[in-house]
Image (cartoon, rainbow, N blue to C red):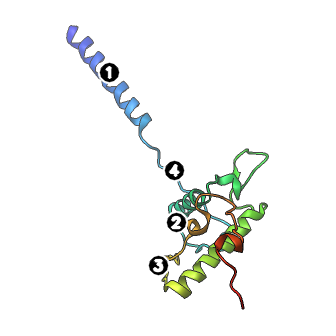
Amino acid sequence: MIFNKKFAATTALIAVVALCVAATMPQQHEPPKLVNLKVFPKNVPYRVLDHQMDEWSDALGVRCNFCHERNAQTGRMDFPSDAKPEKTTARHMFLMMGKINKKYFGAKKDSLGMMMTTGVNCNTCHHGVAFPEIKGQQEHGPEVKK
């Protein structure tokens, strides 16, 4: 009888520990389907795009809602939406940066179509601020006479 009680208690304890471990393990989630890609390659993996967005937000000192609108019904970010003009500006800046890097720094694209090496990036001008200050000619030194 004592053997059965010890066995049952041990089995129950092991089951509880196993359930706790299983509950805390990371769940395998399917990455969201990427839609409305206009400057990124259509086959870009979610993790690559997400990393690029993190780099942009750091370089501009902003969060997702700077370029992306929140869906009023769900309360979640509507990443495919083009409602905010900042998203269009970011696309233009990304294309401009690619052209500069290709023309002046010989940057090549990888197998996904992303630039492998760069001479300039968002931080080159932005330095962590969304709207970098444009300095006038007086602040750069004497005016050049023609």
For marks 2 and 1, give the one nearer the viewer.
Answer: 2
Element carrying mark 1: helix
Left or right, residue 23 beside residue 49? left
Using the numbered discs, state the Cα–Cα distance from disc 1 to disc 4 in whole angstroms: 29 Å
Q: Is residue 83 above or below residue 44?
A: above
Q: Could you tell me which residue is drawn at 54 percent across and 56 percent down?
A: 31
Q: Residues within 10 Å of mark 2 (few under 14, many from 20)?
A: few
Disc on the earlier residue, 2 or 1: 1
In the picture of the structure, the residue carrying the numbered disc 4 is 29
In the picture of the structure, the residue carrying the numbered disc 2 is 45
Using the numbered discs, state the Cα–Cα distance from disc 1 to disc 3 in whole angstroms: 52 Å
Using the numbered discs, state the Cα–Cα distance from disc 3 to disc 4 in whole angstroms: 27 Å
Q: Is residue 32 above or below residue 75?
A: below
Left or right, residue 17 beside residue 47? left
Q: Could you tell me which residue is drawn at 69 percent across and 51 percent down?
A: 77
Disc on the earlier residue, 3 or 2: 2
In the picture of the structure, the residue carrying the numbered disc 1 is 13
Q: Position of residue 109 (x, y in %)?
A: 49, 81
Type of amino acid under label 2: Pro
Q: Is residue 33 above or below residue 142?
A: above
For marks 3 and 4, give the one nearer the viewer.
Answer: 3
Using the numbered discs, state the Cα–Cα distance from disc 2 to disc 4 in whole angstroms: 14 Å
Q: What number is the disc on residue 110?
A: 3
Element carrying mark 3: loop
